[in-house]
Every structure is written in structure tokens, then in C-alpha cells.
Image (tube, helix red, strand yellow):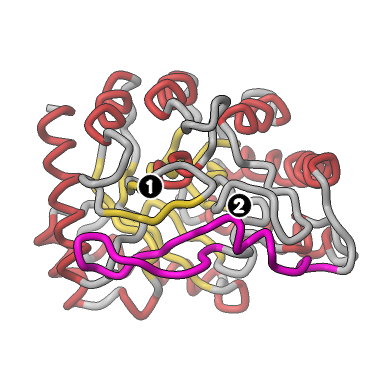
Amino acid sequence: MRLGVSHQRPEDLNADRFTYLKTMGVETMEVRLRTEDATFDTLRTIRDRVTDAGFQLHEIMLDDLYTSPAFTLGLADRDAVIDRFNEFVTDLGRLDIAYTTYAWHTGGAYQTGTTTSRGAVTREYRDPAAQSLPNAYPQTYDDNAMWANYAYFVERVLPVAKAAGVNLQLHPNDPPVNHQGVARIFRSTGAFRHAIDIAGGDTHAGILFCVGTFSEMTGPDGRGEDLPAAIREFGASGHIHQVHFRNTSSPLPSFHETFPDNGYVDLVEVMRALVEVGFDGIVVPDHVPGEGRIEEAYTFGYIRALIQAIGG
């Protein structure tokens, strides 16, 4: 298991940032950029800059195709956008970059306000406020439509990813609730079981297990999902490739993000479950309250300590 950092952009790949990350004990990273900038030469430059600085490059992902309406909603340009995504995946394989992340029309009313966590400004979500917003599109998209579009995407992208040796990491919908006329189908543990079935169990169609987003899910009884059980299930089958390690105040309908040690999820038990299944991928803070270097450093230290204390 390796401590990593996510949300890095090409402009972050500089000596000052690298020195700080090494001080924090970071070993690997995710870099993201826009499709228009993702030429083969640019991808190779990013890879070389990261590895020459002594880090592993876990993945590169595309900001604008991460959750593209073209393929998630089945719009007229779907096939052209899927072709461009497949070209990107093929380039990753040529460069031995083994992972990339996508989501299924996540976002929307990502937050409805802010509050504080131990004095740091943090994201807040209240479902009644999100449900009062107008629909985002002229038509609505129900669960059946979104699942059909997902199966269409997997049928066309998974063979390309397998041939390239690239693992796809599916991020859950955040917030994991239908709103603005779009079904957010990846809103439960059961939804990921269904996704695995659609992909025939192939681990190239894997999961980015976002602890924060899984903690927002209502679960079967409204009190949240059993996160350690989900990790044991998906981790034992080899489907978890990356973990976003953050915490929240409660499941839906309302929550705010917290520091890792003062949310409702017991992250010690989450780490134990990862160790039990032999997870050897990347664990990252995702994002933190305040979003400053001090808050980020605190979270790096918390995660690194858990990896050392529980993982040995």
C-alpha cells in the first residue's frame, strides 16, 4: 500500500511541490489534464517528469472526459467521444501508465453550501436544496437509461483497455443521489456489484473506492453502507485499484466533509479491511477541509500513520 496524492495538474509538477510531497512521504500520484492537451508527447512528458523526480505515476485522467455527458447520457456525439477516450487509453498503455479514472455523470449539485470542520471551511450538501433545483437537461434520464448507456460504454471501452493493459477506475456518484433529472446510478454498494457483472468480472473494469462518497450513501437501512464489508468484497476480488481516504459527518440526506479523524466513519476499521484483503494500491487524501497545505499535510500524516500502524 502506497501513500499518494491526487488532483495534480501539469503546473503542479515542479521542484517546490515535489520537495513538499517527498517530505510528506508521498510515493505516487495522479495527474489530470484536459483532452485537448492530452497528446502522446504530453503524456510522455508528464510521465517522465514524475518518474524522474522519484515518484511513481499511478494514473493520468482526463478532466473533461472523466464524466462526459456525451457517453453517460448517450448524446449524438457519443461514439466520437468514446473513440477519443479509447485513443487516450491506448496511449496510456504505450507509456506503461496502468490506470485512469472515470465516473458516470457525477457532480451536478455537488455542494449546496459550506460549513466548517475544526475551523476549516468545508463542503456541505443538503439534499432538499439540491432537489429544489431545476432539471439540468430538457429530458430526464432514469436508472434504465443510465445503465443502458453504461453497458454501451463498457462494451466498447473495456476491450481496448484490456488490450492496452490499462485498468479503468470507476468513481461513485458524488453526491450518491438522483437529482436534477439525472439518475446517479452509482449510489450504492449493490450498483458496483451490477457494474462488475456487466464487465464479466474483469478487474480491468475496477473501482476507485472513494471512502468519502461511500460514506455519503444511505445504505439499505438509511444509516449508511458497511464500508469495511464492501472493501472486503471488492478488494478480495481484486477490483479496488485506488482509495480516496476521507470522511464525512453522516450519510445522506445531509452531510459535510470532515478531517479524517472526526467524521462518522471509523477509518481505522477501513484501513484494517484494506490490509486484510491485501490491498497494495494507492491511498490518497482526495481533498481536505480548508484545502491548504497545512490541512493537507495533517491528512497525509494521518494516512501514513495508519498504513504503518495497521499495515506493518
Instruction: Find numbered disc 2 in the image and state the secondary structure of the residue it sits on.
Output: strand
Q: Is residue 117 above or below residue 17?
A: above
- Indicate the amino acid at tag 1: His
- How dense is the environment of label 2, judged by Cα within 10 Å: few (below 14), some, or many (20 and up)? many
Give the residue number, with chain letter if any, for mark 1: 244
The percent position of residue 147, horizontal first and vertical second, equals 78, 40
**Callout count:** 2
Give the residue number, with chain letter if any, for mark 2: 103
Q: Quadrant of the N terminus?
A: top left
Q: Quadrant of the C terminus?
A: top left
The percent position of residue 201, horizontal first and vertical second, equals 63, 23
The percent position of residue 268, horizontal first and vertical second, equals 22, 32
Q: Which mark is residue 73?
A: none
Q: Which of 301 and 13 lies nearest the eye of the viewer? A: 301
Q: Which of 303 and 182 lies nearest the eye of the viewer? A: 182
Indicate left or right for 63 with 304 as reference.
right
Instruction: Find numbered disc 1 in the image and state the secondary structure of the residue it sits on.
Output: strand
* Residue at (59% x, 61% y) in the render: 107
Q: Is residue 301 above or below residue 264?
A: below
* Residue at (79% x, 42% y) in the render: 143
Q: What span is colored magenta in the figure?
A: 110-137
Asked where in the image residue 261 lies, by quadrant, the reply is top left
Q: Which of 186 and 242 lies nearest the eye of the viewer? A: 186
